[in-house]
Amino acid sequence: MKKGYKQLVAEANAVVETVPATEAVKRLQSPEAVFIDIRDLPELERDGKIPGAVHASRGMLEFYADPESPYHKDVFASGKKLYLYCASGGRSALAAQRLQEMGLPHVAHVGGGLKAWKDANGPVDTKFA
């Protein structure tokens, strides 16, 4: 293997904005911020999500972000700052890097993911429709 996941995540963290969870909690109420949960659905059901976060699983992220895709989600074209998060920060770093490569300008990820968010006493929504 030429590159392992640790090197890939380190490379992503070197080029994307990482927002500490304590700072991200303060940005939750900003009308210019959108939180994007890239975890798989069973993780959301088990662990909850940041209130108001849009679910966009990592496996479909590029399709959701591309306006030419039939799966496009408007939030990716909103012009708002997108704060991606996963369970602990690795997948969201990779995902933020990919969105930047696709040309999305206002992308960051929550360092430490939902675990750090909870440790920072960030609110968690455990109800799903």
Image: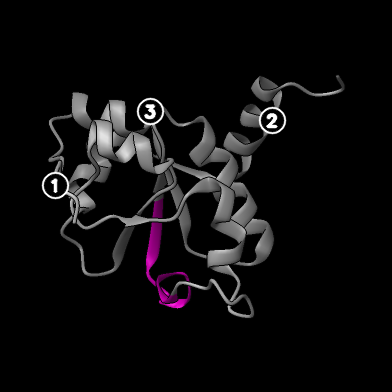
Earlier-in-chain disc, 3 versus 1: 3
Which of discs 1 and 2 lies nearer the camera? The answer is: 1
Which residue has dot 2 on it?
8
Q: Residue at x 38, y 30 (%)?
A: 87
Residue 10 sits in quarter? top right
Earlier-in-chain disc, 3 versus 2: 2
Q: Which residues are magenta?
A: 74-83
Between residue 58 and residue 93, name the one nearer to us.
58
Where does residue 108 sit, x and y in percent of width and height?
45, 50
Where does residue 8 sit, x and y in percent of width and height?
69, 30
Residue 54 sits in quarter? bottom left
Label at residue 89 = none
Colour basis: one colour
Q: Label 2's element?
A: helix
Mark 3: amino acid = Gly
Q: Label 3's element?
A: loop
Residue 93 visible here: yes
Which residue has dot 1 on it?
127
- Label 3 crowd bin: few (<14), some (14–19), many (20+), radius 10 Å: many
Earlier-in-chain disc, 1 versus 2: 2
Which residue has dot 3 on it?
112
